[in-house]
Image: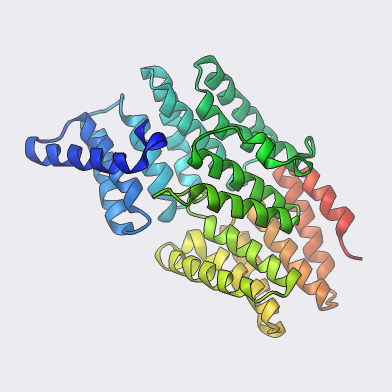
Amino acid sequence: YVYFLEEVLVIAIITRMMQLTLMHGICEASSCAFATCAFFLVDSDREGARHNGDLALSIVEMLNVQNSLPRVYANVYGGVHPYFERTEDAIKYHMKAYDVGIRVGDMTYAIINGYFYCGKSLLCGRELFLLKKECESIIEVATKYKQESKKTLLLPIVQAILTLIGQSDILMQKAEEMITSEFNLERGVWFFWRFLVAYIYCDYNVATHMLEKKRESEKELVRKFTAFGTIDFWEGLVFLAMAKKTKEKKWIYCIQESLSNVRNQAQSSPVHFRHRLLLLEAETASITGDVEYAAERYEIAVNAFDEYGYTNEQAIAYERAGDFFVSQHDGRAPQYYGKAQALYSQWGAQGKADHLGSNIPF
């Protein structure tokens, strides 16, 4: 609870908890201490975060912990796991933590794990109509148990789903009017989902504005919302889109930073990040004028997304490849756009599929 009020105090508290564990031995609370430590370490010391996270999970298993399980899973599978494993691999653990949290009465962390489940499922390309029902069910539970602040984390996910399936026109609304949370972390989460939907709909000015608002709301936070380890990939795509659109050099520096971060992620977890890196490299080559290399990279990228990517990411990769080939008057463009449209429909994002169909430039 302190985390949402004064983040720095959490570090002092968990340090003391870990010190007491080393002095007197492990107990159920020790699992929370090591899990929270892992959560805060992951941005600066990935291996240290993994070690502390594994230790927390071991304590939960060894002591057959139930009361603390939702908190431990939220920190480890929600904050550390995405940097080392595929996002979808953690989804079942968040649903387990959601169920356990309801059973033991930890409604706050039950809903937080429900949020992780919904957010990760959206980024993993889970079928949108099914996911919408699951999100609405968790929101009903949050409402029943008066978890209003945590419910605000779920609302932008539902709004994003509605927009993608074509049942809501969130792009015409002002995000600031929808965001009521007083907590900067929750505001950052709101801005991210707004940013993501705007990018998918190719509204790059709105996407950039939402990204700026996200960064502004999180500037005082030690740990920012990283979209489960994928924020550098999504930011890189928007920076690249803006570089193409405006021709302004300032975006090049942003692109280089995103590329560097995703390249590091691809080295530590190639299955999770290599295909994303390939797409960023293809997009980068397209704006630097290396047409032959860009064409080659797009081909490799879409094949990698076919093997490792999620349906939603596959669709985006095919659409970006289509954009490139149509700019080169290349006859392959229609097949890439067609594949992208089919993948958006498969995902359940019929609103986006129709949007693409009406905006294909031929």
Which one is nearer the viewer's eye here, 214 or 63? 214
Q: Position of residue 354 (x, y in %)?
A: 84, 48
The quadrant holding residue 129 is top right
| Residue 164 sits above or below residue 310 on the image | above
Q: Position of residue 309 (x, y in %)?
A: 59, 57
Q: Position of residue 57 (x, y in %)?
A: 28, 40
| Residue 124 sits above or below residue 278 on the image | above
Which one is nearer the viewer's eye here, 324 or 5? 5
| Residue 247 sits above or below residue 347 on the image | below
Which one is nearer the viewer's eye here, 224 or 284? 224
In the image: residue 322, left or right of residue 124: right
- Visible in this render: residue 169? yes
Q: How many marks?
A: 0
Coloration of the structure image: rainbow
- Visible in this render: residue 310? no
| Residue 156 sits above or below residue 295 on the image | above
Query: Which quadrant: the C terminus?
Result: bottom right
Residue farthest to the top? Answer: 144
Q: Position of residue 359 (x, y in %)?
A: 87, 57
In the image: residue 361, left or right of residue 127: right
Residue farthest to the left? Answer: 23
Residue farthest to the right? Answer: 362
Name the residue rendered at 55%, 34% in the picture: 153
Name the residue rendered at 50%, 65% in the picture: 262
The quadrant holding residue 281 is bottom right
Name the residue rendered at 89%, 54% in the picture: 358
In the image: residue 37, left or right of residue 251: left
Query: Which quadrant: the N terminus?
Result: top left
Name the residue rendered at 79%, 73% in the picture: 325
